[in-house]
Amino acid sequence: MATASHSKLSISFFLCILYVSIENTCTLPLVINTWNFNNATNKAWTVLKQTGTTAMDALVAGCTECERQQCDGTVGFGGSPDESGETTLDAMVMDGRTSDVGAVGDLRQVKNVIGVARAVMEFTQHTILVGKSATKFAVEMGFTSESLATNRSVGIYKDWKNNSCQPNYRENVSPDPKKYCGPYKPDKKYFKIQNSRRDKLIGRKNHDTIGMLVVDSDHNIVGGTSTNGANHKVPGRVGDSPIVGAGAYARNNVGGAAATGDGDIMMRFLPSFHAVMLLEMGYTVEEAASRSLKPIIKYYPDFTGAVIVANVNGSYGAACHGLSNGFPYSVRTSDMKEATIITVPCI
């Protein structure tokens, strides 16, 4: 009998060790974000470890660092001009302790978009503000109004115009958006027989939203995103990043998730919300991440995107689809001296 008990204990111990090795567990606190934006990770960590700061302080500081550094040209000012040549910004923050959310879409002429998202959460009873009125609100809250254009973004726009406005997100309009610039009018011969987005316009270098999750030592979790959206987007377009449950989602006692990729597709499936609900049902972080992408793959097998997931106990992981070299994400915990880049293969 003693031998049998000993065997059961040994098996249990082995399973525990196996579970830990698969789960990527850590000692809290935890900072994790999409892509290899490790400067943002380290900035969030530095703020998180300061006396008197909160997980939200760390999240906003980390994403602000990415905005300031213009990470990959797809976060912050000076990137992804729309059809009119203007750079616009999207962001959101969510507090898992209270479920409070602040978001902003199509923000113009204000660089610190995640700061504005936090202001929406803290100084209004709304969830999201958009467009020129969001800029007016930001200025009222003390943010500086300034141009988001740079020589780089102006050059990108000019090259696009000189290339007959290609690539192009318009469809079922005249003149043919695959050959000519606008202005466009609806094509009266249009008849939709299949889902859209047959052309793969979103990839690694034209839409790398930073999505970040921060879990403090008391197991409080927050999530947020920041991006300048899709290159050459139709003016007024708002992607998945500022949409609750699409760009990010956080819930205390459970965990959080953040997404990046083809936002026009991903927002239709709320992958971040889906992942957190899967955590609540008892799935591991890896299972939650991969399962949250499965419905998207079913309807759009050629889409490109990824999700990071963390629970409030320090387990973290990610899943991706459509990235040939896998998906890198950055993480820092009490067990690490610097942010570490982890790359996962795609499903």
Image (tube, rainbow, N blue to C red):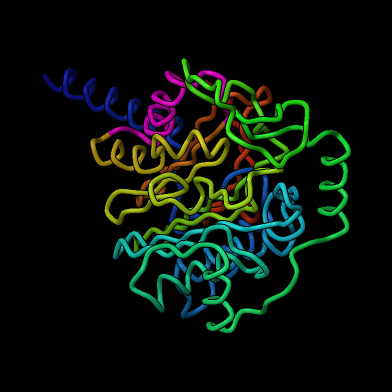
- Horizontal and vertical percent position of residue 287: 38, 29
Residue at 35% in and 52% down: 312
Give the residues drawn in magenta, as a range.
283-304
Q: Which quadrant holds residue 163?
A: top right
Q: Is residue 108 above or below residue 250?
A: below
> Eyeballing the image, is 112 above or below 231?
below
Name the residue at 88% across, 58% down.
151
Quadrant in the picture for residue 35: top right
- Name the residue furthest left: 1
Residue 3, quarter of picture: top left
Query: Is residue 130 positioned above or below 228 on the image?
Result: below
Taking depth in this image into account, of 280 and 187 the one nearest to the observer is 187
Q: Quadrant of the N terminus?
A: top left
Residue 187 counted in the magenta span: no
Rendering coords of residue 334 (x, y %): 52, 57
Question: In the image, what residue occupies the spot 58% across and 56% down?
Answer: 226
Q: Viewed as shown, does residue 27 lie left or right of 131?
A: left
Q: Is residue 125 left or right of residue 309?
A: left
Q: Tell which of 322 and 236 is nearer to you.
A: 236
Give the percent coordinates (x, y) of residue 167: 74, 32
Q: Is residue 160 above or below residue 192?
A: below
- The residue at the point 61 percent across, 33 percent down is 327
Instruction: Compare residues 241 and 3 and report the one nearer the observer.
Output: 241
- Coordinates of residue 139 in the picture (x, y in percent): 59, 80
